[in-house]
Amino acid sequence: MKPSNFLLPGLASICLASSAEAAVLFFDDFTTSGQSNDVNFEYSSGRQSGTLGSVQYRQGNGAFSSTLTGTLADEASNGDLTQVSNNSAPGTLWLTGSTFASVSLEHNFTENAGVGGYTSISFTVDPITASLGTSDNWAAITFGAGDNSAYGSSGSGARGQFITNAGAHFGILFRDNGLYQVFNGSSGIGSGTYDATPTVGTTHSVEIRITGLVDGNAWDGSGDSQIDVYVDGGLTPFFTYTKTGGYTDNFITLESFGGNSQFDDLQISVVPESSAALLGGLGLLGLLRRRRR
């Protein structure tokens, strides 16, 4: 059972009563009937919601995975492990491995929010699930990637690949020593501290807003896109970046390197201008989950 202090399902849904235009495209709380090493276990049995309905994940490490469901044998051969509802943390997604593990949704999230609106990607993350490690261990998200057969840690520009691989994508990682690092493709574009006093078992809420600055569409490649990253209910973004030319695709990948990372409550929403103004006034209170220690 999830902690009772979690405010579900996220900031965008707070405003649904105020604006019928706001749309939660996808939400996954990773709650299943038991532990499974198949990231898609019971994916269509109530754990997901949103206007897109149920969406599967692809997973792998290094080599292309031709199956969507990903068996334990597939994961073991790739050197990684994916779990939903780990026995010690029900209702979460765990990515673990001595090197690199990733899962990517089987949908290209290029829905247009319109002028004045934005795409919202929110989730909670704990990059420290066992012991406080070194800065070499991290959890991450990438988006804005295209799709090709080179799924995994090698190739160029495809979803599911290592955060520093070349190609059009934005990536931000959260290290288990409290530092973060941001990438545009293979280029580092920022770094700093997201948690000054990291401890074992601390969950952080993250929201990323992507706004098309020219025609309102961040995914048609016709204008710049602004990216704002919020952490732990902050009222102002702790990192902002303008992607020249925007993106033409938006495959989203969750990643882990060097240890156990825990994700939860992944939500992708399209927030039009009227809801965006209201959300700006409310801040990120709906996304905030109290830190579990």
Image (cartoon, rainbow, N blue to C red):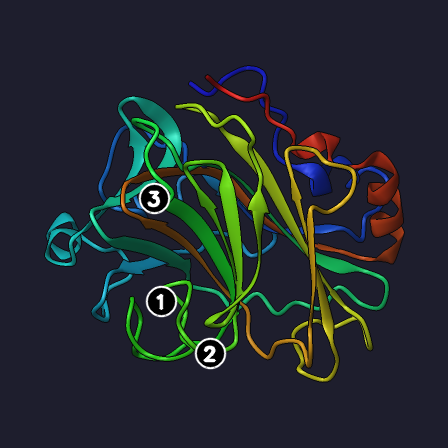
| 33 vs 250: above or below | above
Badge 3 amino acid: Asn
Query: Which quarter of the picture shows residue 119?
Result: bottom right
How many marks can you see? 3
Percent coordinates x, y for residue 123 in the rendering: 54, 42
Badge 2 amino acid: Gly
Q: Secondary structure at mark 1?
A: loop
Q: Nearer the viewer, residue 208 or 69?
A: 208
Mark 1 or mark 2, earlier in chain: 1
| 134 vs 23: above or below | above
Percent coordinates x, y for residue 280 in the rendering: 84, 44
Q: Secondary structure at mark 3?
A: loop
Residue farthest toward the bottom in the current orientation of the protein? 222
Q: Residue at x 45, y 51 (%)?
A: 140
Q: Secondary structure at mark 2?
A: loop
Which one is closest to the eye, mark 3 or mark 1?
A: 3
Q: Residue at x 70, y 52 (%)?
A: 23
Please give the residue where the numbered disc 3 appears in the rendered image.
137
Mark 3 or mark 1, earlier in chain: 3
The label on residue 167 is 2
Query: Which quarter of the picture shows residue 240?
Result: bottom right
Q: Residue at x 10, y 52 (%)?
A: 73
The label on residue 161 is 1
Q: Describe residue 45's horizontal placement relative to residue 155 as left or right.
A: right
Badge 1 amino acid: Gln
The label on residue 259 is none
Question: What crowding class fits label 1: few (fewer than 14 Cα within 10 Å), some (14-19), or many (20 or more)?
Answer: many
Q: Are marks 2 and 3 in contact (CB under 8 Å)?
A: no
For marks 1 and 2, give the CA distance.
10 Å
Q: Are marks 1 and 2 in contact (CB under 8 Å)?
A: yes
For marks 3 and 1, give the CA distance.
17 Å
